[in-house]
Amino acid sequence: METIKVGIVGLGRLGKVHGENLAYNIPNCELYAACSPVEEELKFAKEKLGVTNVYTEYSEMVEDKDIQAIFIVSPSGLHCEQIRIAMEHGKHVFSEKPIGLDITEIERTVAVIYSYPKQVFMLGFMRRYDESYQYAKTMLEEGAIGELTVIRSYGIDPKEGLESFVKFAGASNSGGLFADMSIHDIDLIRWFSNQEVKRVWAIGKNTAYPELDALGELETGAAMLQLTDKTIGILVAGRNCYHGYHVETELIGTKGMLRIAQIPEKNLVTIMNEQGIVRPCSQNFPERFKQAFINEEKEFIRCILAGEQPEVNANDGLQSTKVAIACQKSFEENEIMDILY
Ligand SMILES: NC(=O)c1ccc[n+]([C@@H]2O[C@H](COP(=O)([O-])OP(=O)(O)OC[C@H]3O[C@@H](n4cnc5c(N)ncnc54)[C@H](O)[C@@H]3O)[C@@H](O)[C@H]2O)c1
């Protein structure tokens, strides 16, 4: 079978994870090129990932005609432009979430994506490729908990990252807590319910680092969502988790409930010692979603080879970002926001 030549842009926290998988763990895939403005990251690509073609300029990497697919793992504010350029150069594109940070630019980008229907486009909502989330989705669709009434979803990052986040918050270009983190929960709510979000009310509090107030960033935020069929969505997002990386989702139906990762278990080990009964927890996203990242990367390559489009598409990127931006605005203005379609 043909091998797909991939060029990756961005080799930071997540880029290194994707890069290693694409280089070593994904069949029919060759990590052929890498782009980063940081010399050390290109050295990493050459020495650790075996990449021979490295670029400091994205515009140069996309000119390489041998590259069939681009993997975008750069800062969120760059995604839209890099997606458009890659599509216009005839590449298949995988982009990390969020698809962008500005709705007008996202709409323009989505139009470009859909104008190249033969090129695969996929967005990095990897939770949909996690075994437990897939199991829950199947149970829900088989009617195991009746009709859906509430979805409650948490995404709380470990406190270890907060100190550096506070330091770099202004420059991080994250789009704020809701676009950066809750976007996964928003996607899950849309995915599980097959509904769009109609109204949101978001609130937040900076307790551990009040200085985040001045930067317009949040340490902890929450939102209440009303979906088109009146299903209730509840989000909590944070950056100050003491026990590890806490991602948990609950579905409440008319005939039962499902909880995914009620305890963010690292493995099946239980420690019994002088502290009592201890369950080790996942400490970060690469650990918790290790297999989900591999599954989504495999799916991207499979779709290219099969000439199919993945389930997670450009519209999912647009709709989830609309909701995230409405949450951010709702928090800033302390008002309920309607989402316009
Ligand atoms: N799916 C997930 O759960 C998940 C987790 C973490 C991050 N992300 C997303 O992945 C993206 C990257 O996040 P990260 O945490 O790895 O960030 P990071 O800051 O650690 O890495 C960003 C990378 O982009 C590179 N870069 C910066 N400017 C560039 C430019 N002009 N051209 C090319 N490359 C450039 C940097 O050198 C670095 O390699 C973000 O959009 C983020 O939202 C997704």
Image: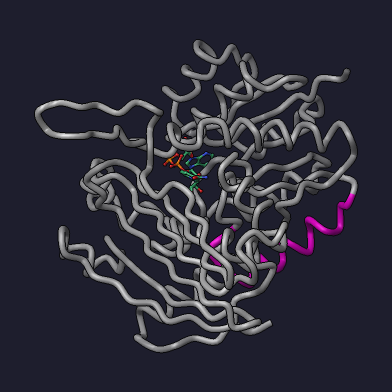
Query: On the rendered structure, is 84 left or right of 58?
Result: right
Query: Is residue 236 in view?
Result: yes
Q: How many marks?
A: 0
- Give above or below for 4 relative to 176: above
The answer to which of 209 and 140 lies nearer the viewer is: 140
Q: Is residue 48 magenta?
A: no
Residue, x 15% and y 58% (percent of image)? 208
Query: What's the residue at 56%, 74% (across, down)?
Result: 149
Position of the C terminus by quadrant: bottom right
Q: Residue at x 61, y 56 (%)?
A: 99
Give left or right: position of 90 versus 61: right
Residue bounds of the magenta highlight: 100-117
Q: Is residue 112 magenta?
A: yes
Q: Position of residue 338 (x, y in %)?
A: 55, 87
Q: Is residue 306 left or right of residue 240?
A: right
Q: For the stretch drawn in magenta, what is the main secondary structure?
A: helix
Tell which residue pokes out farthest to the left in this image: 274
Whether residue 32 appears in this view of the structure is no
The colour mode here is: one colour
Rendered position, 175 above or below 59? below
From the top left corner, tell me how far across and down residue 101 is, in percent. Answer: 53, 63
Image quarter where the N terminus lies is top right
Q: Residue at x 64, y 71 (%)?
A: 147
Residue 178 placement (x, y as % from top left): 43, 64
- Residue 170, position as x, y percentages in the image: 31, 58
The answer to which image quadrant residue 301 occupies is top right
> Quick check: 181 above or below 226?
above
